[in-house]
Amino acid sequence: MKKRITIKEIAKELNVSISTVSKSLNNSPEISKETKELVKTFAKAHNYKPNSIALSLKNKKTKNIGIIIPEIAHDFFSTVVTGIEMIASQNGYNVITCFSNEMFEQEVKNIETLAESNVDGFIIALSKETQQRGDYHHLREVINQGFSLVMIDRVAQDIYCDKVIVDDAMASYKAVNYLIENGYRKIGMLTVPDYISIGNLRTKGYKNALSDAKLPIDENLILVIEDIQSDDIISNYFDQQQFDALLCSNEFLAVKAIRQAHNRKINIPEELGVIGFADGFLAQNSYPTLTAIDQHGLEIGKKATQMLIENIEGEKENSRTEIIKTSLIVRESTRAINIKP
């Protein structure tokens, strides 16, 4: 008997992407007729059979859950995984964790690898590149072939599945309000691009808070950062703009902002207040310690796993979105004088 070829091997042999092969085999209108015929002919000649995605309507459950997250460097995601493992273990499930490293193709490979491992369902936070491309064919394929799917944190609204998120817009709104109530008036923002769902929502909350407080929205004070490893763009922002507070979309950006302030001998929190999303190790151990928006990653992980297991075990049919409330953890990077605007 011939050995079955995989989508990954077909892509390598034909020198095309995995997504192109997948779309061709599923008759996607995005792929040319010639490419689809080439892929299908090659697949048939090499004994291709649908992998575990297409065979997922199996009777026997494996009690394995596949997790795909963008990276583990963020304490937020590691805390989410801890919550997932807690509930999975309590219910007799094993957890297999993969990292997309913020890349679309890697995310697609992760899906296929986990499917071939016969997982019963997926929990996924979308990669930066996936949201930038807006290509969710691999997720639709997963759902169409009967896998249970729960999306967390970074989600796609047009994928109909269970989701667990925080109210990012409201969290930003409340954080900016706190800064305003404590005497800060010229508030800037360090954020990620709008194509990342959390970036869009957090910027929206920031703007709404300023607008409701009748403070001007200065687009020059909103710094969108593609690569959080780049210090120069933040340094230039400090050199060119005037502000007395910053809301940062993650704790990495917040710590970089604090370092820029130290380099310029700007006193925190007297001259500059800083708030960051995610209450992780960096927030708790920076100098000064960071006022942070706690997204309760542990609860996100627990809730997502409960929802996934309910789906796997057939306890519910309709998809829903669960919103986990955030908390503002006040520390040394903001002053607290409660001046009303």
Image (cartoon, grey):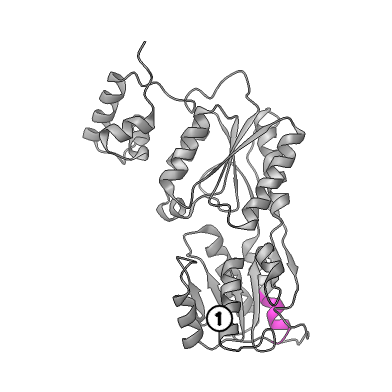
Residue 98 part of the magenta-drawn span = no
Q: Quadrant of residue 248?
A: bottom right
Q: Amino acid at mark 1?
A: Gln
Q: Tell me which segment is drawn in magenta.
A: 176-183
Q: Percent position (x, y) of residue 259?
A: 58, 78
Instruction: For the C terminus, give its image quadrant.
Output: bottom right
Residue 272 as seen in the image, left or right of residue 113:
right
Where 134 sits versus 254, above or below? above
In the depicted view, which residue is nearer to us: 106 or 312? Answer: 106
Q: Percent position (x, y) of residue 154?
A: 56, 53
Where 149 sits versus 117, above or below? below
Where 266 sits versus 159, above or below? below
Q: Quadrant of residue 86?
A: top right
Where 127 sits versus 216, above or below? above
**Residue at the extreme left of the image, as rendered:** 34
Residue at screen point 44% across, 76% down: 232
Residue at screen point 50% across, 31% down: 144
Q: Percent position (x, y) of residue 312?
A: 65, 30
Residue density around tag 1, few if under 14, some if 14–19, many if 20 or more, within 10 Å: some
The mark tally for this picture is 1
Q: Secondary structure at mark 1?
A: helix
Residue at screen point 60% across, 58% down: 74
In the depicted view, which residue is nearer to us: 204 or 330? Answer: 330
Could you tell me if residue 335 is visible in this image?
A: yes
Residue 3 as seen in the image, left or right of residue 107:
left
Principal secondary structure, stretch drawn in magenta: helix
Residue 177 part of the magenta-drawn span = yes
Residue at screen point 44% across, 40% down: 108
Could you tell me if residue 322 is visible in this image?
A: no
Residue 23 as seen in the image, left or right of residue 64:
left
Q: Percent position (x, y) of residue 235?
A: 48, 80
Q: Which residue is mark 1?
A: 260
